[in-house]
Image (cartoon, rainbow, N blue to C red):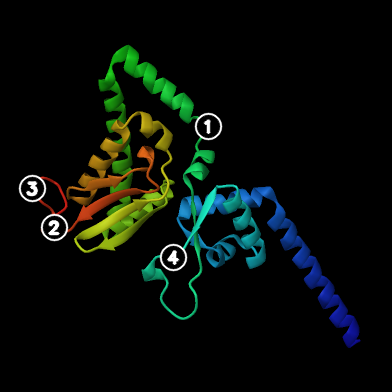
Amino acid sequence: MANCVELRHNTVVKIDQRLKAAKSEDPRTRDLVARSILENGPSSAATLASRLGLTPAGIRRHLDLLVADGVLEAREPHAALSRGRGRPSKVFLMSDSGRQKFEHSYDDLAVSALKFMSAQLGDHLVSAFANNRAEDIERQAAIAISKKSKKSVALAEFLTQQGYAASIQSRPLGEELCQHHCPIAHVASEFPQLCEAETEALSRLLGTHVQRLATIAHGDGVCTTFIPTPQSSSTNGKVRA
């Protein structure tokens, strides 16, 4: 009797393992792995496995293939995140070529439409469109951050919900808002007015002048915005060395 129970248990375990393996080998799951990193920022294999409900072995197969294809890059974790015993796990992040594969198909149409608008009616209408878009984001974000005590953290959470995969990093003279993905990067590379209007909206939301240090639209890996503490901002809007 015990042997029959054990046999039944082993059979169920093997079937479950085969189902998980089949899920792991599904190319669509590989896309989910890449998109999870795109939307949530750099992640370890263990974090991804837990987030997506995959086995560690299955997630590593996907990660190895995505790195080999140039979609992801593997890096050592930040020193602040690698404390403790043992060798720290590598983190995986989206490469520049990987971002391009996930660009929305309507980006080219948006660029063409804005180019036509600029040529036919003038650059001022492109700027008006950028400002209107930024003001719409600002209205939605203002509601979200009004419910939280820490504005910068609440703003990062809101932007993540909008597809920017944002996070806040502490710095000696303030904070940095890091956006690991930009849904409009391809369009913004052609029309920087979009980035400029967004930056101004962020300043208004946070009640202080912020400074863009890097943008995905200009070829950087992450959009980085410096948020100074009151004592670290200068009259020229530059960060003190």
Between label 2 and label 4, give the one nearer the viewer. 4
Q: Position of residue 89 (x, y in %)?
A: 51, 69
Mark in the foreground, 2 or 1? 2
Q: Which amino acid does the dot numbered 3 rest on?
A: Thr
Quarter of the figure with the N terminus: bottom right
Residue drawn at 29 percent across, 31 percent down? 193
The Cα atoms of the two marked residues, 3 and 1, are separated by 42 Å
Q: Earlier in the sequence, mark 2 or mark 1?
A: 1
Residue found at the very far bottom of the displayed protein:
2
Q: Amino acid at mark 2?
A: Ser
Q: CA distance from mark 2 to mark 4?
A: 28 Å
Residue identifier under label 3:
235
**Residue 118 location (% of width, % of height):** 32, 18
In percent of width and height, residue 30 lies at 63, 51
Query: Which quadrant of the view contains residue 228?
Result: bottom left
Q: Which mark is residue 105?
A: 1
The residue indicated by pointer 4 is 77
Q: Whole-Å distance between the Cαs marked 3 and 2?
A: 10 Å
Q: Is residue 225 left or right of residue 83?
A: left
Mark 4: which amino acid? Answer: Pro
Q: Is residue 147 visible?
A: no
Q: Taking 171 as reference, is 105 left or right? A: right
Tell me if residue 31 comes above or below residue 119 in the rendering: below
Rendering quarter of residue 4: bottom right
> Which tag, 4 or 1, sits closer to the chain's start?
4
Say which amino acid is labelled 1: Ser
**Crowdedness near tag 4: few (<14), some (14–19) or many (≥20) residues, C-alpha within 10 Å:** some
At a point 42% along the width and 72% down the height, the residue shown is 82
- Single out the mark in the foreground, 4 or 1: 4
Q: Nearer the viewer, residue 35 or 201?
A: 35
Q: Earlier in the sequence, mark 4 or mark 3?
A: 4
Q: Secondary structure at mark 4?
A: loop
